[in-house]
Amino acid sequence: MLTNLHVFALRLQKHLFFYMYPYPCRWESSFKKLQVTVPAWKRLPFVLALFMVFFNTLQLVLGAIYFLIIKRQKDYGRFHFFMHTYIAYAFAVWLVIAKTTWQNLTTSIIGINELLEMERELLKRHPIRRCHLAIILSSHQHSAGALLILSIVAAGSPFVVLFIMLSFEYDMLHFILHEILPSPTEWDIKLILFNLCLRAIFLLSVMLELFRTIAFVFALLVICFDSLTTILHILESNLAIPRIFKGGYLHISVIYKSMERIVSVVVYGVVNVGFWFVVLNVWIQIKGFGKVPTLLYVCSISLTIMAVLLVVLFLPRFVAFLDKLSTLPASHVKEMAYLSVRCKWRKDIKIALKRAAALQPIRLKFGPFYTIDENFIMEYMCLLTMRIFDAIFIVDFERPSV
């Protein structure tokens, strides 16, 4: 159910990034649906942003190999190498997510509008009890509040990253310029300003688009998730009515198929980037105590706490949602079988039971071979713990120059 807080968060994102090129979609209050606002021929700035991210990814990978392995530069340690390779990996994943999102933007917006329209129609025909509606609205307000906070954080994060990178000289362009230009002792004020401006332009050109895309994709996923929660509650209340349940579940299946590519790519990217993000930050906190600047150490702890809180708050709800989504057809079959026995295997009930058994459950895929369920989450957490211990006990930390 799309609340006023959802709409406010979408509009806030547009205003927070007002200095960038037009936002890809907007909420039309008169039609109560999302609308694509940027035609294909106006997406040239986004293509340029993709090129800048690709260039920075290539620069990070080649620079890390050159400075650590080929040249063995003293002021470029393992900390720099792991940080730069992780950022390059995150950039590469973001490139895939951004490209997939923009290629399937129109299809995704149509799918979201269909979900919202379906939700409104079901609420009109099959109203939810007040006590259940209050619980659903409360959960939607929480997710919309998280979206609002994420939008504000995403708007300020590029400038925080810029300050940290320029202050502690952790960006790859700093090492490349020191390799190309004369010794820093020979720099005049013009060369110093050129150095800072060039590094700032490279960092901001990437970070602004990166964080805006993250906020936008997260907003679309939150709207889909909240709308589906309401729809599944209505379908769960009508398991014994084949016309309502089958029609609704098939409608969801068609919408999911139209958005399956973008959803699977986003989930795969977020899970992988989050995995190595936690490993790298825990390694910095344990091995880098007293060896990295205090500000960076505090930022690392804060980001790790934020990631853990997100997992604790949203993962149980997300897993319960996926479990309900995949097990509803089986529950519908049980209800129809019980109804068939009570009605002494009436012909129309038997036909409805066969049709119910033919429903395919909707499962969220992780890559080509796995589906996300409770077993997958347990394996993921065990593997994460193993990789953290490997990083702590095997990989040494070298003191970075600051």
Image (tube, rainbow, N blue to C red):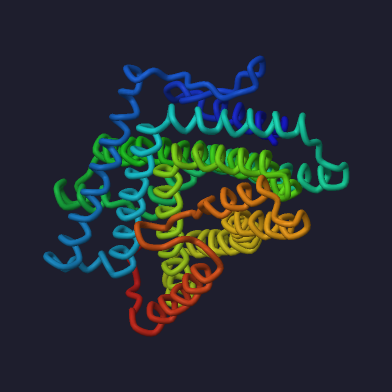
Image quadrant holding the N terminus, namely: top right
Q: Is residue 283 left or right of residue 53?
A: right
Asked whether, in this view, residue 400 is left or right of residue 177, the answer is right
Q: Is residue 273 above or below residue 380?
A: above
Residue at the spot x=64%, y=32% of the render? 118
**Residue at left offset 37%, top offset 57%:** 367
Q: Nearer the viewer, residue 133 or 278?
A: 133
Residue at the limit of the structure toward the left, as seen here: 70
The answer to whether residue 320 is seen in the rendering is yes
To which quarter of the image does residue 270 belong?
Answer: bottom left
Asked where in the image residue 28 lies, by quadrant, the reply is: top right
- Report x, y in % for residue 185: 22, 51
**Relative to the observer, which residue lies in front, 387 or 60?**
387
Q: Residue furthest right?
A: 130
On the image, the x and y values in percent for residue 30 come to 66, 15
Judge whether 297 appears above or below 221 on screen.
Answer: below
Q: Looking at the rendering, in which quadrant would you find the C terminus?
A: bottom left
List x then y, in percent, for residue 96: 33, 44
What count of labels does the image hold?
Answer: 0
The answer to whether residue 219 is left or right of residue 4 is left
- At x 22%, y 55%, the residue is 61
Asked if residue 314 shows in the view, the reply is: no
Residue 170 on image: x %, y %: 34, 55
**Front position in the image: 313 or 319:** 319
Residue 327 to residue 138: above or below: below
Res. 10 image quadrant: top right
Q: Quick one: which residue is furthest to the bottom in this view?
A: 393
Residue nearer the viewer, 345 or 363: 345
